[in-house]
Image (cartoon, rainbow, N blue to C red):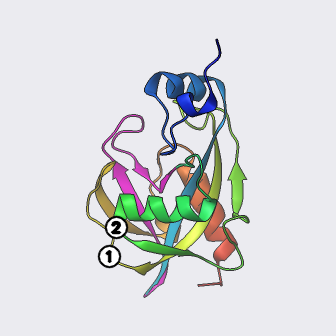
Amino acid sequence: MAKSADSVVPKTGFIPKELFDKIQKTMPIPCVDLVILRRGKIGIKVLLIKRKLETEYGKWCIVGGRVLKGEKLAETIERQAKRELGVSVSIISPWGPNNPVRVFDEPEGDPQKHAVIMVYPVTIVAGEPAASGPEFNESKWFPADGLPEIMGFLHKQEAEAAIQAVTGRL
């Protein structure tokens, strides 16, 4: 007898770990990544976090994560910024929740899953970024032209794409 959808997918947006692991191994996962930017005294700066979790432990990364069931992209963006850094963000115009600066669909970009990543250039509109959080033990502003040589996942390419797109808009 087949299970009903309600017995497999809870209304909270989370699913049982066994099912999640199976899905993650077999299906692309929609994700958002936030390239958090600000204008510094001598140019654009990018906020990066140093991961304290596997995979990509110890590497500089941008903030992001998967879209949960029942969540709109704008909600995912705000949830990730609030949960990871304790801030609220705004997408830099002319981009928006349904108009990311770029989409990355590289199957090998994340060693755990095939993430389809929508990249958003954002600025902080409320709060100060946390110094550490659930997935990182350090946060730091880097000059846009001085990103770390090695970054986690595809985050260097994502940050560079966002920086290139917004140059002159901040």
Residue tagged by mark 1?
128
In the image, residue 45 lies in the stretch drawn in magenta:
yes
- Find out whether the residues at labels 1 and 2 contact each other: C-beta distance under 8 Å: yes
Image: 36 above or below 25: below
Q: Secondary structure at mark 2?
A: loop
Percent position of residue 57, x then y = 35, 39
Image: 79 above or below 10: below
Which residue shows up at 61% across the image and 69% down it? 163
Q: Is 129 in front, or is 11?
A: 11
Image: 47 above or below 166: above
Q: Is 137 in front, or is 66?
A: 66
Front: mark 1 or 2? 2
What is the magenta range?
41-65
**Toward which corner of the image does residue 1 lie, by quadrant?**
top right
Q: Secondary structure at mark 1?
A: loop
Percent position of residue 104, x then y = 68, 48
Residue tagged by mark 2?
86
Q: Residue furthest bottom?
A: 41
Amino acid beneath label 2: Gly
Q: Is 54 in front, or is 7?
A: 7
Query: Is residue 12 rendered to the left or right of residue 95?
Result: left
Amino acid beneath label 1: Glu
Image: 136 above or below 95: above
